[in-house]
Image: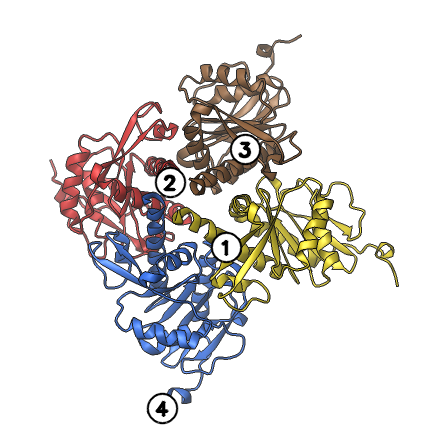
Chain colours: A brown, B yellow, C blue, D red
Amino acid sequence: MTSLHETPAPACDAAALDALAAFGRFAAARGWVPATAGNFSVRLDAAHAVVTRSGIDKGNVGADDVAVVPLAGPIPAGMSAETPLHLARYRADARVGAVVHVHTLAATVLSRADRAAGAVRFAGFEMQKALAGITTHDAVVELPIFDNDQDTAALAERVEARLATSGVPGYVLAGHGLYAWGATMNDARRHLEGLEFLLACTLEERRIAR
Amino acid sequence: MTSLHETPAPACDAAALDALAAFGRFAAARGWVPATAGNFSVRLDAAHAVVTRSGIDKGNVGADDVAVVPLAGPIPAGMSAETPLHLARYRADARVGAVVHVHTLAATVLSRADRAAGAVRFAGFEMQKALAGITTHDAVVELPIFDNDQDTAALAERVEARLATSGVPGYVLAGHGLYAWGATMNDARRHLEGLEFLLACTLEERRIAR
Amino acid sequence: MTSLHETPAPACDAAALDALAAFGRFAAARGWVPATAGNFSVRLDAAHAVVTRSGIDKGNVGADDVAVVPLAGPIPAGMSAETPLHLARYRADARVGAVVHVHTLAATVLSRADRAAGAVRFAGFEMQKALAGITTHDAVVELPIFDNDQDTAALAERVEARLATSGVPGYVLAGHGLYAWGATMNDARRHLEGLEFLLACTLEERRIAR
Amino acid sequence: MTSLHETPAPACDAAALDALAAFGRFAAARGWVPATAGNFSVRLDAAHAVVTRSGIDKGNVGADDVAVVPLAGPIPAGMSAETPLHLARYRADARVGAVVHVHTLAATVLSRADRAAGAVRFAGFEMQKALAGITTHDAVVELPIFDNDQDTAALAERVEARLATSGVPGYVLAGHGLYAWGATMNDARRHLEGLEFLLACTLEERRIAR
């Protein structure tokens, strides 16, 4: 059996680049990647992913704005500090084909408001069915919250330890933003859109319920 | 007299597809169909409608994304679980030519907040005149709220029983979203836009009135 | 001297149609003309204006969607019920070259909230300088509020009686929407945008100040 | 050594115009330059900048809509009253290559709400890292607030006196709007987007925290 480190690095294929660029345009149009924030990735094979580089305009992703990264590292220069969070997802679950991370207002504010609880809870929303494996609104969904940490390798370990028992395809970093993933980029985007809608509705309910 | 079941199924014509695609682009631009949510339909004849399929990107509806469905069933595979709600509207009222369903924040939040009252009430808004048959702001409009239910056939029966005496061309499902209809797709869209505006204003009034 | 009624009706020129269509696209993109709401006009000469017809998609105004209307009437069939409010502005002030009316959330909600006061008051905003004749933020601007009325001819009389002493190029109808005007369509749009920004900021201050 | 006044005025180059036009389209799409508000500039050399003219549509900036202005003055006719605030930034810091000013709702409202405190304070947001020199969320960022003043030359002096000890690449004028700058237009835009996101999140926290 060949170890991950011995796998020759594949090139970024056109489909992967198209998926990253299309998601970037979508996210930028909604204002979810302000100030070059956010990063997205697509799995290439069992040992590699294509990840957006740091500091680029996420609404206009081209071939020079992404890099092929071995899941086991090392991470090339010029990548986002959050790349370890992406790689950890691919290593932990072979079904994960795409990971997206954006900065939305609702995710940022609710992840701070509910940090002590460790999760944002949703119940009774039809939109919960946008998440893979959920077939009814009549359930409670817990979106995990993690404290933000500039040591993203350590953060990735804490995240993955908890995700092992979470059935939800996403999490929030407190004061930072929202992560979501799926078997394909379409699935990752659907999960992200669904979670953001649930967060936005929940934030609105806090505004009128006090 | 020929029964509904014996009517040969017509093909989806270009006008119907154009109407569904144009409405989809409109709804997607406003963020009303997140995570592939929402579904739309157009009546083809006395016994058939064209309905969007489940799980597709509602902002980019093509010929493969819709299906001709007999109003009396059976419903083909791959259709949205909410297709019975569309079909019931066409069966109940021969004047209905188009039905649209979207997930907006205001509809989702207010349908939960006012569920016990069974309706969201609007009064004194000029926008009430966007609804067919209403000619003054000086009236009370009651938008019915129904409890959400994954058994959409049973839900459709409850909905239609109440709609028989409601003059409003729309309703909300609690925690789920907004339905509207009209003689044409333009009418359905005008009703939807008008109801959404009324919901958004009402939500805003809750924010500042407490 | 020729009376207004004897003036031969001029044709709608290309510049007027372009101005109306461009404003319509702008307003539709911002969601200010939902459900075919809103209407806009441009003065053609001392006795005529071009006004958008009723019930059309205001984001896609073409030559068939406007009509030349004598300022002194009669109003042709198919025009908006609010046409008298436009005509009265042109008759009352020869400097008025364009009138625009839209339905925004902030205008609708604040015009209801402050109806008893008869005006929405702004003070200390730099944006007040967007209004013709205002050169400092250090002033109080009063945007008149009028009760809505389906008898728009009577409403126009009440509006004009008060506007004779108002220096502000706009007003709101309670629960209905915002009117603004100017010497040119650019001026009318600038006034509308400025007033809407002031309304939106004021509404936001109500949200956080309670 | 040649004094600033003796430097021959360079022409506006295509790159500078492109940067101003592109930023204008970006800002207009977000609604940050309503009613022709806002102004942007790019440094040309040690003694000159290109600045947008007053009263133009900031979403459609062409060659006639900008002017080369000596940093030491005099300011040509037709420029925004806020031009001195731009020039003072370039004179005070040779590293500043672009300055942008927009009117956003969050900046306008929070600059009024926190005027007595003299600053809007942010802490614990990952987005703080969008600001040059900040490498962690675990810090406090103080965005200076200045009272608005129609005497912008005097205002520029007060602003620069305080900025000498502020590490933040932006400030707000109370009831007026947001300024940001950077070594390049990309940097200025990133700072502006980051500060606006922080302001919007902070405003949202005020809504739900009372």
Residues C36 and B104: in front is B104
Q: Are marks 4 and 3 in contact (CB under 8 Å)?
A: no
Q: Amino acid at mark 4?
A: Thr
- The quadrant in which residue A22 appears is top right
Report, in whole angstroms, how far the alpha carbon at label 4 lies from the one at label 1: 46 Å
Q: Chain of mark 4?
A: C
Q: Are marks 1 and 3 on the same chain?
A: no
Whether residue B13 is visible here, answered yes or no, is no
- From this viewpoint, which residue is outermost toward the bottom? C1
Q: Residues within 10 Å of mark 3 (few under 14, many from 20)?
A: some
Q: Nearer the viewer, mark 4 or mark 1?
A: 1
Q: Residues within 10 Å of mark 1 (few under 14, many from 20)?
A: many
Secondary structure of the residue carrying tag 3 is strand
Q: Amino acid at mark 3?
A: Phe
Q: Please give the name of the residue rendered at 63% of the width and 27% of the height, measured from the top-left corner.
A: A183
Q: Are marks 2 and 3 on the same chain?
A: no
Identify the residue under disc 1: B197
Identify the residue under disc 3: A122
Report, in whole angstroms, how far the alpha carbon at label 2 lies from the one at label 4: 60 Å
Q: Please give the name of the residue rendered at 54% of the width and 67% of the height, measured from the top-left corner.
A: C55
Identify the residue under disc 4: C2
